[in-house]
Amino acid sequence: MAHNVRKAVFPVAGLGTRLLPASKAIPKEMATVVDRPVIQYAIEEARSAGIEEFIFVTCRGKASIEDHFDVDVALEAELRSKGKDDALEDVASTELPTGSFTCIRQGRPLGLGHAVWCAKALVGNEPFAVVLPDDVFLSDKPVLQQMTEAYDRVGGNMLAVVEVPREKTNKYGILDIGDDDGTIATVKGMVEKPNPADAPSTLSVVGRYILQPEVMTALDDQEPGKGGEIQLTDAIARAIGHQKVVGFRYEGERFDCGDKAGFVMANLAFGLRNKDVGPSLKKMIAQLSR
Ligand code: UTP
């Protein structure tokens, strides 16, 4: 079935200070979780969800991201001539169809809201997904696919949400919710990174969104919010009262690969499930924990 959401925006113009020094010369999105860069998980998830147009909001120094999804004619010819069919298949699986991906630059890292706004003309007047590649999910059904399926029923602006420990509310956008059926919660308000004592709930927004084009319009007169950055949550909050805004509780486990601990945990979790790496990793973990 064709989904109503055809386009996805991948903001990849952040500084990645939490992953320094690893992210000094290599974009954090190109850091490897087991056998592929973090950004590839996001693209694979979006493709499973039926996304047809991929928009990268990028910046100076991040050209390797677009190269990764482009055709490498010389490499393919080399692998073919050597009969390395498995490697050839792996390389081919990274290619996005010609004409399906675009890159636009965010000159200065003014915040996630500003990064998304940079893609305004490319998104046009239709609903779109925003996928933050830092968040890598281990799930039976890809999280964005869970969302597009729910969106086809519910519509509106949809934010992936998860419960977080109260002491961590100051790291996330937190929702104030109304009606809640356990999967979909109506959003009455949103606060960016509230102190635990002030947080209206512990339901936090994570890196997957399906948004209406009006959010782009709200970003037109963007003002810096929390942390001096132009916040996406502030623009979504402006839709509350005019448009439906809902939180979607996804099924799966999230790893924040923009953070050192999350990145290492993702490597372990995905490594343990990988048929090539898993058995020796299990053996090593057993030895280390003796
Ligand atoms: P983060 O909050 O993780 O910021 O951004 P960051 O700069 O990437 O990383 P740290 O905090 O310095 O370690 C969330 C997402 O928004 C993108 C990032 O690339 C990431 O996907 N982003 C953020 C932009 O594209 N532009 C910005 O100005 C800010």
Image: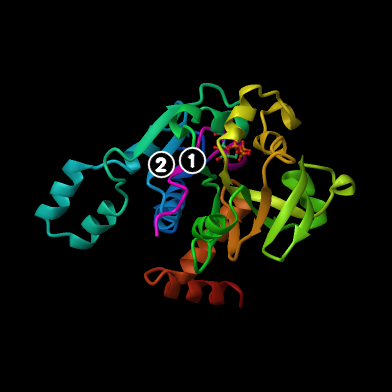
Dividing the picture into quadrants, the one containing residue 202 is bottom right
Q: CA distance from mark 2 to mark 1?
A: 7 Å
Percent coordinates x, y for residue 141 in the rendering: 49, 66
Residue 173 is left or right of residue 120, and the answer is right
At horizontal 37% and vertical 34% (from top left) the residue drawn is 102
Give the crowd class for mark 1: few <14, some 14-19, many >=20 residues within 10 Å.
many
Across and down, in percent, residue 260 comes to 60, 49
Q: Nearer the viewer, residue 171 or 149?
A: 149
- 199 in relation to 106, above or below: below
* SS label for mark 2: strand
Q: What residue is shown at x 84% (from left), y 48% (from top)? A: 199
Indicate the position of residue 161 as horizontal and vertical percent values. Answer: 67, 55
Q: Is mark 1 within 8 Å of ligand 1?
A: yes
Give 168 or 251, whichever is nearer the viewer: 251
Q: Amino acid at mark 1?
A: Phe
Q: Is residue 97 positioned above or below 202 on the image?
A: above
Where on the image, by quarter, is ligand 1? top right
Does the magenta-highlighted stretch encompass residue 240? no
Q: Are marks 2 and 1 in contact (CB under 8 Å)?
A: yes
Name the residue located 57 percent from the left edge and 72 percent from the top edge: 288
- The answer to which of marks 2 and 1 sits earlier in the sequence is 1
Q: Which residues are magenta?
A: 1-21
Q: How is the image coloured?
A: rainbow
Q: Which residue occupies the extreme right position in the image?
A: 197
Residue at image mark 2: 54
Q: Is residue 2 visible?
A: yes
The residue labelled by disc 1 is 10
Q: Is mark 2 within 8 Å of ligand 1?
A: no
